[in-house]
């Protein structure tokens, strides 16, 4: 005769005693309304990620702000496509910025705007990742972002790392004809002065190098160094 399977003893009393508050924790989300009313998009993002990486959202979701009670944050001055890149970064640690049909991969105006968004929401990791994207997509492929400074300079401080990166791009890689372009002279005095100063420094120190030799450590262009924080690459590698 086949052996009978062992009977499973149920404990209905124990099951009945399970409380809702003892269920596994499910992270909360918040609705982020992005863009002008006629083109707004709503992004549902986990609050723990926003609080971890963004000082702006950490403050907005504190008990003192109305956004904490309504579970809604509005960013009317931000383009939805740029916030989508930010949201994807929070979950992956990567900057997914290219789109089908882009003439460059990705176009530097979008990357520049992503860096500006990182400054807007006070997310050092996202700004540093955008800086790395500049290096990966331009310096390492011998391409030159000619207009990124138009977005970066009005939205960054004098000593910001992204400014130093753009200046080094120009000082080390630009052909002299780039500086003769009429569009470059439009409201761009601060950038031109910074490049001129950097060129003199390179000449005086005999540092002039070709191709990629001027890129020694990408963290030189990261904000986390001055803030004494770990690099975002280290943070996201630990999370994987």
Image: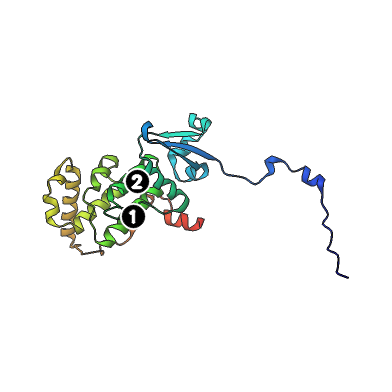
Mark 1 is surrounded, within 10 Å at the Cα level, by few (under 14), some (14 to 19) or many (20 or more) other residues, namely many
Relative image position of residue 236 (x, y in whole percent): 47, 55
Do the residues bearing badges 1 and 2 touch, measured as CB atoms within 8 Å? Answer: yes
The reply to whether residue 227 is visible in this rendering is no
Mark 2 is surrounded, within 10 Å at the Cα level, by few (under 14), some (14 to 19) or many (20 or more) other residues, namely many
Going from N to C along the chain, the mark reached first, 1 or 2, is 2
Q: Residue at x 11, y 50 (%)?
A: 180
Residue at mark 1: 133
Relative image position of residue 223 (x, y in whole percent): 36, 49
- Image quarter where the N terminus lies is bottom right
Q: How many marks can you see?
A: 2
Q: Residue at x 47, y 50 (%)?
A: 91
Mark 2 lies on a secondary structure that is helix
Residue at mark 2: 114
| 2 displayed left or right of 227 | right
Relative image position of residue 154 (x, y in whole percent): 26, 40
Q: Nearer the viewer, residue 4 or 158?
A: 4
Q: CA distance from mark 1 to mark 2?
A: 10 Å
The reply to whether residue 100 is visible in this rendering is yes
Q: Residue at x 16, y 43 (%)?
A: 189
Mark 1 lies on a secondary structure that is helix
Relative image position of residue 127 (x, y in whole percent): 36, 48
Instruction: Identify the colour scheme used.
Output: rainbow
Q: Nearer the viewer, residue 113 or 53?
A: 113
| Residue reaching furthest to the front | 1
| 197 displayed left or right of 237 | left
Q: Residue at x 12, y 46 (%)?
A: 182
């Amino acid at each position: 005769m086949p052996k009978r399977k062992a009977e499973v003893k149920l404990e209905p009393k124990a099951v009945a005693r399970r409380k809702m508050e003892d269920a596994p924790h499910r992270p909360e989300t918040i609705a982020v309304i992005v863009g002008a009313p006629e083109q707004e998009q709503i992004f549902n993002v986990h609050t723990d990620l926003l609080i971890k990486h963004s000082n702006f959202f950490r403050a907005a979701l504190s008990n003192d702000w109305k956004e904490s009670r309504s579970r809604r944050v509005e960013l009317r001055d931000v383009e939805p496509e740029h916030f989508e890149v930010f949201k994807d970064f929070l979950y992956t640690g990567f900057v997914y910025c290219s789109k089908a049909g882009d003439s460059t991969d990705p176009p530097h105006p979008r990357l520049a705007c992503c860096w500006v968004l990182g400054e807007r929401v006070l997310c050092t990791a996202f700004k540093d990742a955008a800086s790395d994207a500049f290096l990966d997509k331009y310096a390492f492929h011998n391409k030159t972002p000619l207009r990124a400074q138009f977005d970066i300079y009005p939205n960054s401080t004098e000593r910001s790392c992204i400014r130093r990166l753009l200046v080094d791009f120009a000082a080390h890689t630009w052909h002299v004809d780039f500086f003769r372009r009429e569009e470059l002279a439009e409201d761009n005095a601060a950038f031109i002065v910074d490049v001129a100063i950097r060129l003199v420094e390179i000449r005086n120190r005999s540092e002039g190098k070709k191709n990629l030799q001027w890129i020694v450590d990408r963290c030189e262009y990261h904000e986390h160094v001055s803030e004494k924080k770990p690099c975002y690459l280290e943070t996201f590698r630990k999370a994987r």
